[in-house]
Image (cartoon, helix red, strand yellow):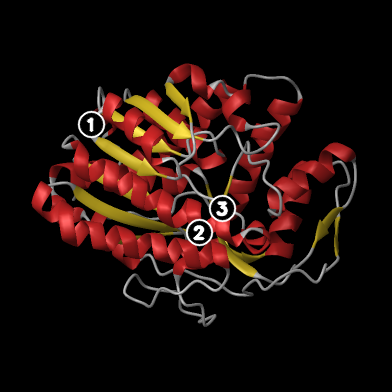
Amino acid sequence: MYTMTNLSFWQGKRVFVTGHTGFKGSWLCKMLVNAGAQVAGYALEPPTEPSLFNIAGIGDLMDSTVGDIRDYGTLSDVFNRFAPEIVFHLAAQPIVRDSYKNPLYTYETNVMGTVHLLECARLSGSVRSFLNVTTDKVYLNTEKESGYTEDEPLDGFDPYSNSKSCSELATHSYKNSFFKQSGAAVSTARAGNVLGGGDFANDRIIPDCVRAARKGERVIVRNPFSVRPYQHVIEPLAAYMMIASAQFGDDRFAGWYNVGPDEGGCVQTGVLTDLFCRAWGEGMAWEDRSDGGPHEANLLKLDCAKLKQTFGWRPLWDIAAVVDKTVEWTKIWLAGGDVPGCMDRQIEEYYKARETSR
């Protein structure tokens, strides 16, 4: 059985991360650097102000290039100069509502950006392991109670979700057409919603809670009864690292994986907001105020049996712990405390708990 706590694998590995200036990308780079990897990143400027990338000084830990994934020439130059062994593709336009506002940019970034990176990997000769990070929203969502398995149809509804479905198909084509011959192992990972310190994005419930808390206002919840799978950001990132390292040595591990919480992590938005308000304290509260926005599914669940059976993996932190750690990070940041130290501590706590749970 492959173990995800074997972090010594990463010592000295050359790892390329797209989207490294974003929330998930910043946490991933921190985890990789802590494990001893040499990390290069390619992304736009941080997508929010403030940003985790700048607050935690992630750029000082790695080779960071500001560039557009749609610019194949620049991407190719940076990629070839670094000659990575392992690639994590996180660069994306990730917001459902923004995809309705600008579908062309969303498709250019999420589809052709993926093709550009796959082409770089195809021509490089250095890549041994490639992981495309997509989303739980790639599935044709009939709001089934049991959760989607990896073999079910892909057909995201909105431009964001659909563009990530297309990204999956492009990855599949490159895998079959080119990478089987080259010996590079290719996987995609479909994760649910992630929480954690340093997410400042618009139209996400926990960042909305943080903004309301800073202002001393009530949280506005636009759809309190929608059900989503929530997990701490470290959870799927550790799974991505596990998949990428496993397939590096054995391409039989390559494939398509759902990464999400168990039933207890699939909660209504209102329940999640309740947990945040209690963890924050100070009389924080929320109110239901639908804004009549564009279509969003009411129910979305993943079946993660494949990941569990292949790796002996299981979710570690329950939803209350996830919220507590998010609040912990946020209060340290607001107090001007040691944010990188908090991240290091939470990463270490995760892997120690993972080791003892084996």
Q: Quadrant of residue 13?
A: top left
Question: From where the camera sits, is residue 281 visible?
Answer: no
Query: Is residue 197 rendered to the left or right of residue 293?
Result: left
Look at 51% across and 24% down and name the residue there: 58
Mark number displayed over residue 107: 2
Q: Nearer the viewer, mark 3 or mark 2?
A: 2
Give the distance between the C-alpha atoms of the residues marked 1 and 2, in whole angstroms: 35 Å
Of the residues under marks 1 and 2, which one precedes in the sequence?
1
The image position of residue 105, as x and y in percent, is 56, 54
Q: Residues within 10 Å of mark 1 (few under 14, many from 20)?
A: some
Which mark is in front, 1 or 3?
Answer: 3
Q: Mark 3 to mark 2: distance in Å?
A: 11 Å
Residue in the foreground of this view, choosing between 160 and 351: 160
Q: Are marks 3 and 2 in contact (CB under 8 Å)?
A: no
The residue labelled by disc 1 is 9
What residue is pinned by disc 3? 94
Label 2 crowd (10 A; few <14 / some 14-19 / many >=20): many
Q: Secondary structure at mark 3?
A: loop
Q: Secondary structure at mark 1?
A: helix
- Foreground residue among 21 and 211: 21
Vertical comparison of 220 with 45: above or below: below
Residue 214 makes an appearance in the image: yes
Mark 1 vs mark 3, CA separation in Å: 30 Å
Which amino acid type corresponds to the residue marked 3 in the rendered image?
A: Pro
Taking the image as shown, residue 199 lies to the left or right of residue 135, namely: right
Q: Amino acid at mark 2?
A: Tyr
